[in-house]
Image (cartoon, rainbow, N blue to C red):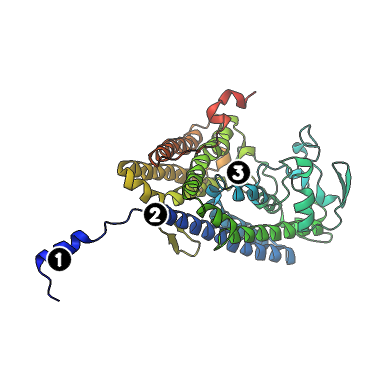
Amino acid sequence: MKFTTSTALALLLAAPAFAATEKSAVLDTYADIAHAGYEDSLITAQALQEAVDALIAEPSEETLTAAREAWLASRNPYQQTEVYRFGNAIVDDWEGKVNAWPLDEGLIDYVDDSYGGATDENEYAALNIIANPSVTLAGQEVDASEITPTLIADTLNEADGIETNVARGYHAIEFLLWGQDLNGTEPGAGERPYTDYVTGEECTGGNCDRRADYLKAATDLLVSDLEEMVAAWGEGGEARETVMEDENAGIVAMLTGMGSLSYGEQAGERMRLGLMLNDPEEEHDCFSDNTHNSHYYDGKGIQNVYLGSYTRVDGSTVEGASLSDLVAETDAALDEEMKAKLDTTMAALGAIKEAAEGGFAYDQMLALGDEKGEELIMGGVNGLIDQTRSIERVVSTLDLSDVAFEGSDSLDDPNAVFQ
């Protein structure tokens, strides 16, 4: 068939207009990124599991260092999933199993005398389950002669309903690998010796066999918990199905996660509060001095969700239709503003990360009167707050309702922090 110019023009005019971004496609990308992020968290946790097994089998400086490095590597993909916690009840109900913080570490193992003992808030703050094969919790005698994932999960974690009785997850494992950081706002992380895992006369800290049992059980539990969330975001999984069943509710979940993590959780509870109190105990990864990475990858997770793109640990990329696409179709200027503010925040968090990796540890940044530290941390805080204002504008532009972001006294009522 021969086409004339007029025929071609008529066909062009008859062709359908470019389809607008479908909310279902945006949610598909959101779920795909969640699945990939939790899968990467699982893969790196399995590598940690192998390193822990090696440490227990042959304790040495080398195997302890390798286990610590595996823990650090496992945090980067996990932190990028924290944006899924807010807005997704399935994730929020589960998250306490793997990332609860802060914790009263004396529940688990020996601590320095400066730590103190039981408190009015937590009579089990110095229980030291590793040293005690039989304990009493909430009036009930507990047989802890064998430390298992079941004992940790069902009996010890949040014992007697106390949230700081954190017995499982990344931070319990972190404590068992590093021990307490007793350096205050001076340089240095925890310095647990590898001999804490050597059985026999060379054992330090006592109960090295039980400490190894606890570390093994907690790591195995972390792997099984992550397997649960990988399945939840896979095809047919409960978390994916919940997000997809109501498109508007799914978009609300995305923005709730972005806004709540940006504002109340990260800018407030994880950053501004610690600076107000000048307290290194408010660090998120306080035993390992890894807080700079936790903050950076939390911020990266927020950006991932907006842009609909996630770089996996193997270097591959998961990407697709995004919130950015959706916003750009309604208000291109707002989309550019949102992307620019995310970039500004990531630059500020990147400056914290760079400084820490250059020898200026996050705990040092928290020190009273340290102007450079305050400038770095407040750069991140201000960026997160500013991007939250644009997230609020996105909510309005997309004509969504029932969107509420987490707050923080450190931002909303600073005087309350000191009461």
Which mark's residue is nearer the viewer, 3 or 1?
1
- Whether residue 23 sits left or right of residue 214 in the image: it is left
Dividing the image into 4 quarters, which one contains the N terminus?
Answer: bottom left
Residue at x 52% of width, y 37% of height:
405
Q: Which residue is mark 1?
A: 8
Labels 3 and 2 touching (C-beta < 8 A): no
Disc 1 crowd, CA 10 A, few/some/many (<14, 14-19, 20+) = few
Say what amino acid the circle numbered 1 marks: Ala
Q: Which residue is mark 2?
A: 22
- Whether residue 348 sits left or right of residue 261 in the image: it is left
Residue 145: image x %, image y %?
A: 87, 56
Splitting the image into 4 quarters, where does residue 197 fall? bottom right
Residue at x 57% of width, y 57% of height:
73
Say what amino acid the circle numbered 2 marks: Glu
Give how far apart the Cα atoms at labels 1 and 2 are. 29 Å
**Does residue 111 appear in this view?**
no
- Residue 200 in the image: above or below residue 134: below
Secondary structure under badge 1? helix
Q: Which residue is mark 3?
A: 284
**Does residue 236 appear in this view?**
yes
Residue 40: image x %, image y %?
A: 55, 61
Secondary structure under badge 3? loop
Residue 208: image x %, image y %?
A: 80, 57
Mark with earlier residue (3, 1):
1
